[in-house]
Amino acid sequence: MKKQNDIKNKINRHAATHPRESQSSTLNPKNDFLLELLTEELPPKELTTLAHALMNAIEKKLKENGLTYQSAQYFATPRRLAVLIHQLDAVQPDRQIERRGPPLSRAFDEAGNPTQATLGFAQSCGIQHTELIKSQTDKGAWLAYVYCEKGKSVFELLPTIVQETIQQLPIRKPMRWGSHTDTFVRPVHAVVMLYGKKVISCEILGLQSANKTQGHRFLSSGWLTIKQPSEYESIFKKSGFVIADCDERKKVIHQQLAHAAKKMGADVIVDPDLLEEVTNLTEWPIVLIGTFDAAFLEIPQEALISSMQHHQRCFPLVDPHKKLINQFLIVSNMVSKESQKIIQGNERVMRARLSDAGYFYRQDLSKPLIQYVDDLNRVVFQAPLGTLYEKAARLAKLTAFLAQQLGINLQVAERAAFLAKADLMTQLVGEFPELQGIMGYYYALKSGENPTVAEAIKEHYLPHYADAPLPTTELGKTLAIADRIDSLIGIFGINKKPSGDKDPFGLRRAAIGLIRLLKEMPLLNLDILLRKSIELYGPKLTQHTVENDVSDFIYERLKYWTTSNNEYTIEQFLSIDKKQVHALADFMARLSAVRTFSTLPESKSLASANKRVAHLLEKQEGIAAIDAVDPALLKESAEKTLWQAIIKKEAEINTITDYTDKLKTLAELKEPVDQFFDTVMVMTEDSSLRQNRLALLKKLRALFLKVADISRLITTNT
């Protein structure tokens, strides 16, 4: 045993003289690192995502390897993806590595000799067992071997980091080219890997890394040499005819568009998605002006604009009155002495596209809109739910049901709902789906329909996204609500609700739109609408919990919508009873009132008092049956004062309709509430006094619950 103790003491002394933290204080030089992949033309709609993913993945792996840096930025053009890391460590820091061996209880036998487990472990470490140390944690003690692992240089680490990063990129359809076994989003022609002025020599995607790349496909010739990462952008601008930075390129395009429009005395319609796309299609953008035949302006301008933007990637021009003019802007990727040929080529294709749109428009007008309704029978909405015609019939009934509550003309409401989906069967909407509703509006007017009907058809798709404009007409809002309710009940009713990040039917967007619409319609009750929609579907629905499922879904989307932009806190949201979600306008009015109340100096004290009261009441059996306070049992002056204050405030708030004003009035209870809790013992031994005081507190809490449960404003860790 003495021998065993001597060995353990020796191990402990060894541990004391071998600290685990590295004592290295070697200076680690820093330099810039550049990675560029020169490729065939990359898909423009995926370019930004790929560039972000490449940079983020490299940053993550640098951190995992203990390499620090100052900052990172990405570059992306149609022919290249690049990442520049500023001031990257040249070498990762040394690391103390601990290999854990057998537990100390099994490391030595009774005679103090090392066991076979100890000897085997020491041998695997390449040392004598006497060189092992004791490792002590709160989970026990072990023998361990601690050694210093020298940090690797970036020249050793970066090839692996880049290889692994490329393999993890979110590429939807990887390509294989030539005799290569590697895959990428498009064929790769060159790889630049520079650290400072030195090439990191390795093979990436079957290519030897170097410091050479190419500029613009047509404007630049030969290979460009990148001497050091910091020259990357400037060498392209000087010799390569490439603006490598996406944001700078987008800004240049936007400025050129505005300048060209101003020169024409017009305004340019800049769609953000289109601007992003043309930015990702060009390396050296130049804006040119094209013209089309003014006769095409007889076609609804939305159809012309859609054709220009989606088919030709051109930017429409409008006059000061927002009317389309017969000129458009082209973003070319070429500087040419013969730019007129580029313009003429675009004009020729534009003429063909607009001719197609004109042909579809005239064909669609060959019969009135009502005659397209029967064609909806040929399109399935969802197999278990029937056709679009059946959806239109449900919409007509549900919209009429809503119209009765809102005082809207029933015949007009039913007509608008019945025609709402008819334009889906027209040729122009078939070619340009984004025109649904818009073309329905024009075709309805051309068919002699009531202008109110036409406007509702156009507006019922609004809002298109969370912050988009709402319908402006009452019928438009009503039809938009009915359409979203029908879709939510139908899809949830056949158990195809969204899961994870998958939402193929856009139900999250539909729910946010419904919330915004109902917020504007205080007369409508969500629960009643859901039940009516379920009734109209009848036996088609298989999920018996569909009403609760949709109600819960809308509640969760409401929580997300109100708290995601920091307009309201989660505590404020949860203070409103979930049951109030049936009346969205009322729910939001209460929520707004709580937010205002939270800014008052009295709010924290009253919220804490309400939380204390809630805890006291939760612990008491039978308190629910005690509603009446017996004034004769009020002994302390503080409880009498509080009772009088409660009676007074109850009378006051019963005459107030605005929730904010109600809470501001109740905020005046702070002093009597504080005085009560400072001087009155609630849980006294006298049961009658105790119950009466609890009833008093219940009365106090009930006043606030008429608006919200302000005790929820106090977080659990406060």
Image (cartoon, rainbow, N blue to C red):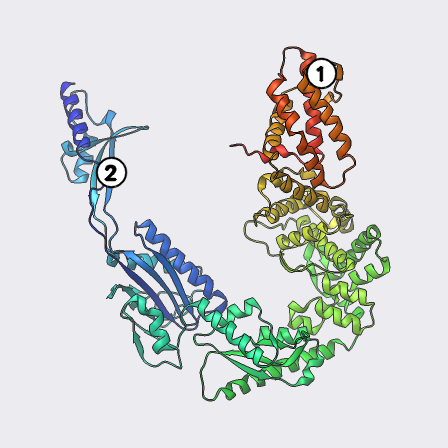
Determine the secondary structure under disc 1. loop
| Residue that badge 1 annotates | 634
Q: Provide residue 679's location: percent of width, then percent of height.
A: 61, 18
Depth order, front residue of 391/260 = 260
Determine the secondary structure under disc 2. strand
Q: Provide residue 125's location: percent of width, then percent of height.
A: 18, 39
The residues tagged by marks 2 and 1 sit, at their Cα atoms, a distance apart of 72 Å
| Residue that badge 2 annotates | 99
Q: Is residue 460 above or below residue 259?
A: above
Residue drawn at x 72%, y 22% as measured from the top left: 643
Instruction: Please state if 30 lies on the left or on the right of 7 as rendered.
Output: right
What is the three-letter code of the residue carrying label 1? Leu
Q: Provide residue 118's location: percent of width, then percent of height.
A: 19, 31
Depth order, front residue of 346/589 = 589
Q: Quadrant of the N terminus?
A: top left
Q: Is residue 524 above or below residue 610?
A: below
Residue 622 visible in rendering: no
